Image (cartoon, rainbow, N blue to C red):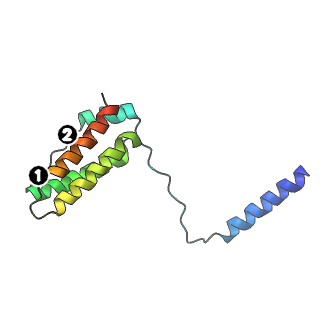
Amino acid sequence: MKKLLTAVVLVAGTLLTGCASPATPPTPSPTPRLSVADSCKFLNTDTFVPSGTAKEQAGQIGQHYQEVADKVAPEVGAPIQKMADIMKQVAASPAGTKTKEQTAQLTEEINKIGQYCK
């Protein structure tokens, strides 16, 4: 019975593989993320400095936060992703300056990171 089951599984697997479109590239594996401890070390040594107008700086900061969020541990990356989204909104505003609400949201996300990086 086990031999029959194994044969069925092998045949089914072969058939399913044959049905896959050859034009479909394999899904790339996600980039490995840093551990929480390494993420905190990385954040403490990050020396990014934006340049240009307030609007340009907000866009650069949003992009930098996005890149960092993709690199660090998910626990730290989630608040940084929210910060990136906020800064992208700031960059899209006419003056490129943060509102009081956005400043409060950024502070809240920084505090969340602080729970992991003490």
Per the image, label 2 sits on a secondary structure element best described as loop
The residue located at (18%, 63%) in the rendering is 92
The residue located at (33%, 32%) in the rendering is 115
* Extreme residue in the top direction: 118
* Vertical relation: 43 (above or below) 84: above
The residue located at (27%, 52%) in the rendering is 84
* Vertical relation: 90 (above or below) 65: below
Q: Residues within 10 Å of mark 2 (few under 14, many from 20)?
A: few
Residue 77 spot, x, y in % from top left: 35, 44
**Image mark count:** 2
Query: For this view, does 27 lie left or right of residue 35?
Result: right
Q: Residues within 10 Å of mark 1 (few under 14, many from 20)?
A: few
Using the image as rendered, state which of residue 116 and residue 30 is in the foreground.
116
Residue 7 spot, x, y in % from top left: 84, 57
* Extreme residue in the right direction: 1
Residue 6 is tagged as: none
Would you identify the image quadrant in which residue 16 lies? bottom right
- Residue ID for mark 1: 51
Residue 28 spot, x, y in % from top left: 50, 56
Query: For this view, does 101 lie left or right of residue 54?
Result: right
The residue located at (88%, 50%) in the rendering is 2
* Extreme residue in the front direction: 101
Would you identify the image quadrant in which residue 88 lies? bottom left
Using the image as rendered, state which of residue 7 and residue 115 is in the foreground.
115
Three-letter amino acid code at the position of disc 2? Thr
Residue 51 spot, x, y in % from top left: 11, 51
- Residue ID for mark 2: 47
Q: Evaluate if marks 2 and 1 touch, with contact meaning CB atoms under 8 Å apart.
A: no
The C terminus, quarter of image: top left
Q: State whether residue 73 appears in this view.
A: no
Three-letter amino acid code at the position of disc 1? Ser
Per the image, label 1 sits on a secondary structure element best described as loop
